[in-house]
Structures are given as C-alpha cells and as structure tokens.
C-alpha cells in the first residue's frame, strides 16, 4: 500500500494551498483530483480577485491557479489527475480509482478539499438541453473555448450569477435578463453595476415559470413572485433564448467526510451538510482536516487561506513543525482571513439587509433593486468627487474587502486607509497624472477617470473595457448610463492597452460635458 504523510483530496485553491504549506515543512504530500486539469475553480475565473496584496488581489483567477501549481511543483508536491477518490475508511485509508485500477493509499493525515457542487432548481422544461449551471458555462467558455449559446437568461444575482453574466457577454453571448426570486441583488454591487451598464435588465422578485422547447430550449417565461415566492398572475414575461443559465448556490461535497465517520451537521449558513470542525479545519477525527467550500461556502480567496491553515496544522499534528511555530503562522493567517470576512458581505451578515455603509451613508436602494446606483444617489458616496482636470471617480458604494486602487496610485490620489472595507476617497490636493493604473487595478471595474470640462463644451471619460473587438480611435457611438440606457453621443478618443493593465483596456470617450458624470459605457453604432 502506498503511504504518504499527507493525502489531499481536491486540487483546487484550498487543496493546493494546503499541499504547498505541508510540503514546505518536509512532508511527503500527494493530491488527488478527479479532473484532467488541476486548479479547481481558479482556471475558470478570468476576473480579477478582490482583497489586498496578501490575498492576491487584482490578479486573475487562472493566473493564481498557475502560481499555485508552480509553487506546488517547486516544493515537490505530487499531483495525480483523473483520480477519483471513492472511499475514505478507518485508519485514514483512501481508495482511488485511476483509469481502470482501484488503488489503496494510506495517509498519516488527510485534508479533504473537495469543494462544492452547483445547486439546481426544477421547473417545467428544466431537463431540456440548453439549461446549464453557471459553473458549466464557465467551463465551456474559459477552459474549452466553447460558446454556451447565443441568447442567455441568467437565474441568480449572487456573485457567481453576476460574474458569469459578464463573462458570457465577453464570450459574445447576449444576456437578455438577469433574474432572481430574491427581492434584492445578492452579490457585490460593483459586479451588478458593470453588468447593468451594458444594458442587461434585472428582474428581482422574479423566477422561472417554465422553459420552452421540444428538443432544446427555445424560450423561457418568468413571472414575479410575492413574499411567499408564489407566482403573481398577470406578471409573466417571455424571452426567446437558447440557453438558461442557473446560478442558484452551491452545496459542500462532504460525502467522504461522512463516510469516514466525521461528525456532521446541517448548517444552512455554511451551505448544507458540513463537518463539525474548528476554525483551523480540525474535524472530530484526529488527523483528518478540511479546507475550502467543503466546510462552508466562501470565496476562493478565503479557501486559499483555509488551505494554508490546514497544511500548517497537519504539519504540527505529525511533528513537522513545533506548536509555537504553528501558532505564530496561524496568527498571521487569522488576520488575513479576518480581513476577507469583514464588511457588508461578511458571513455574519448573510441574509441581513444592510441599510447604511460603515461610514453611515445610506445604501443605494436602486442598486439593490435594479443593479445600478441611480444618478440621484451616486453623489453621496465619498469616491465621487469633482475637480478641475482629469481626476478619479470611484463608484464603489458598498463595504467590501478590497484596496488595490490605493496601492496602484503612485501619486497618492486614492486612500482607503487601514480598514480594508472602507469606501475609497480622493485625497485632497492630490494631482492625478492620468496614468490609468487605478482604473485597470479595480477588481470591480468601478473607477473612471473624468475630465468634466475640456473647455469646448465636452468632457472625457476613461472607463475599463474588457470586450473584443476594441473600438478604434475616432469610432462614434453612444454613451450608456449606469442603467445601460443611451444618454448621449460619444466618440472614442483614446484606447490604451499595456502589460501593467493585465488585459483591462482603457477606453476614453468624449461626451457633452453635461454627461461627464452619467456616461459610463460605450456602445459602437
């Protein structure tokens, strides 16, 4: 029987992070994953991460995945792919199916990092070809280069639904609507805003009545629901679509832990059936640890830190690191994880309706109900300022853990401060040099460089642009408002692409000066 100091199930962000920390301390580590490529969800994620530098903020998910693989290779981690773990038994015996063989392994310690599976909802026609999960859509687009459909309806306004909606449009799909039975947007406001300003309508307190078609999806009907989630007659709306994408939550894949005899609980706040464990992933069975979504649904940034914690704790369990060294390392990781668990979207705030920001500013009702901040609401947020000449306008309106813009501005124009969830402000008497680094670094695409008065009756707006083909300088089109509706004529005056921008192009448009604070997207005509 093959024996390892540490066997890890799952080569996603938490599993690879645990493997790296354990191997760095001299442990013999193997990672099994059922997929043909390692990295879990990371290689599907083409957007830039939130957080701070220590959380790998403003780095795209697939880049982080490659960084983890490189680190794992450097420290000697063995990664076995197309390997399905089918059993976890007494004395930490792991049974793995690799090809046509079933092989038994023995681990002195185990980390289960199996992640989570997509939830589904049922409705008439839900089994038709063309009804897919958001994760499946990401796999098609970002791993295999396959366009999921032409016209897509997205169900779910959490971060997954918002991010995948944007990626569908980047792929060339038309997202006809974003629908959610909940009465308010569930994900980050900046994610919702970047979808809304492209013209995608939001239908909150709505859900799917039925999918239409005989052999494949040809249409979908939605309707409004009341507070009991019952359909309201007469509110039906029909869309011709060929794809219905579902982003309705995740459930931890905790079956192996139950098989091993770990104490389990049903915990809706953590996503469903999860192991009972401490804050460092220790389960009820000594030597079996957990990390990532299998112990509670969170973001990939949190999963990586949890994985590092599990790797350090496993090393201490087997004597590869002294207890005092472990405690010192865990203290650092605790602080990093605590930073991600602050703000409006912290685990403690799940399900709560937050009325004000940490600064005491009223949350935009329009953002929660329609996906965008109203023109009459935007001025109350501290990042929205007026100056002579080019200056940053930061439409960050919720307390989320993110501060790359502060580090990106070498002239010190932007400040968030010590609290990572504070809303950004423009520093008094600072001088913007129009470099665009803040626009490119913003993970939520919520920063614009604005010259409100060019002296000839026009203004310029520099905005983040991640679509192809890129408009050419001189191209004429329309300026779209935060709600995705046409507000004015616009002309492209500059297109900047640089390695430092990491594939976020900077598009500068000229608009009538009265629309300087309203035009937020460009549509070619």
Image (spheres, rainbow, N blue to C red):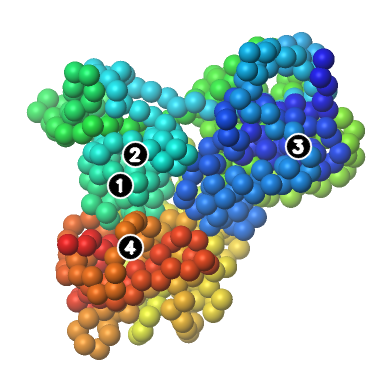
Q: Is residue 441 left or right of residue 384?
A: right
Residue under label 1? 172
Whole-number angstrom distance, CA of label 1 to CA of label 4: 13 Å
Circle 2 — which element?
loop
Q: Nearer the viewer, residue 405 or 434?
A: 434
Whole-number angstrom distance, CA of label 2 to CA of label 1: 8 Å
Quadrant of the frame with the N terminus: top right
Counting from the top left corner in percent of width and height, residue 149 is at: 29, 36
Relative to 218, does residue 43 appear above or below in the rendering?
below
Residue under label 3? 77
Relative to 503, does residue 319 appear above or below in the rendering?
above
Residue 227 in view? no
- Residue 147 numbered mark, or none: 2
Labels 1 and 4: the sequence-earlier one:
1
Counting from the top left corner in percent of width and height, residue 289 is at: 72, 27
Labels 3 and 2: the sequence-earlier one:
3
Mark 2 Cα shell of 10 Å, populated few (<14), some (14-19), many (≥20) = some
- Residue 470 numbered mark, or none: 4
């Amino acid at each position: 029987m093959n024996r390892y100091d540490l066997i890890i199930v799952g080569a996603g962000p938490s599993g690879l992070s645990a493997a790296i920390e354990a191997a760095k301390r001299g442990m013999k580590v193997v990672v099994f994953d059922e997929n043909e490529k390692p990295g879990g969800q990371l290689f599907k994620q083409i957007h830039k991460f939130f957080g701070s530098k220590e959380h790998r903020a403003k780095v795209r998910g697939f880049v982080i995945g490659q960084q983890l693989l490189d680190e794992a290779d450097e420290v000697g981690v063995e990664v076995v792919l197309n390997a399905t773990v089918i059993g976890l038994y007494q004395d930490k015996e792991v049974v793995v199916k690799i090809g046509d063989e079933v092989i038994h392994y023995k681990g002195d310690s185990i980390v289960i990092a199996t992640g989570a599976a997509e939830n589904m909802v049922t409705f008439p026609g839900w089994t038709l070809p063309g009804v897919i999960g958001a994760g499946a859509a990401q796999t098609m687009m970002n791993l295999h280069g396959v366009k999921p459909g032409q016209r897509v309806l997205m169900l779910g306004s959490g971060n997954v639904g918002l991010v995948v909606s944007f990626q569908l449009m980047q792929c060339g799909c038309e997202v006809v609507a974003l629908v959610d039975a909940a009465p308010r947007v569930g994900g980050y406001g900046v994610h919702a805003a970047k979808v809304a300003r492209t013209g995608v309508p939001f239908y909150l307190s709505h859900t799917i009545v039925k999918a239409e078609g005989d052999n494949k999806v040809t249409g979908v009907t939605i309707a409004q629901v009341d507070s009991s989630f019952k359909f309201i007659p007469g509110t039906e709306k029909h869309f011709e679509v060929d794809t219905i994408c579902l982003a309705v939550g995740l459930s931890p894949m905790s079956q192996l832990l139950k098989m091993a005899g770990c104490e389990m609980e049903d915990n809706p706040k953590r996503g469903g059936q999860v192991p009972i464990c401490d804050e460092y992933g220790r389960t009820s069975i000594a030597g079996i640890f957990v990390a990532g979504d299998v112990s509670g649904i969170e973001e990939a940034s949190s999963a990586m830190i949890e994985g590092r914690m599990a790797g350090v704790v496993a090393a201490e369990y087997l004597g590869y690191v002294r207890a005092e060294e472990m405690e010192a390392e865990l203290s650092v990781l605790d602080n990093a994880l605590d930073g991600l668990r602050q703000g409006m979207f912290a685990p403690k705030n799940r399900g709560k309706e937050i009325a004000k920001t940490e600064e005491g500013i009223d949350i935009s009702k329009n953002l929660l109900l329609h996906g965008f901040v109203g023109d009459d609401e935007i001025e109350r947020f501290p990042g929205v300022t007026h100056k002579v000449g080019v200056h940053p306008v930061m439409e960050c309106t919720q307390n989320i853990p993110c501060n790359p813009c502060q580090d990106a501005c070498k002239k010190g124009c932007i400040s968030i401060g010590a609290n990572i969830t504070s809303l950004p402000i423009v520093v008094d008497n600072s001088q913007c040099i129009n470099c665009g680094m803040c626009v490119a670094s913003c993970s939520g695409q919520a920063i614009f460089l604005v010259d409100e008065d060019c002296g000839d009756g026009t203004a310029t707006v520099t905005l983040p642009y991640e679509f192809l083909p890129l408009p050419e300088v001189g191209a004429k089109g329309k300026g779209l408002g935060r709600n995705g509706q046409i507000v004015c004529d616009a002309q492209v005056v500059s297109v900047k692409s640089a390695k430092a921008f990491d594939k976020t192009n900077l598009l500068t448009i000229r608009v009538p000066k009265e629309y300087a604070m309203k035009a937020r997207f460009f549509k070619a005509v």
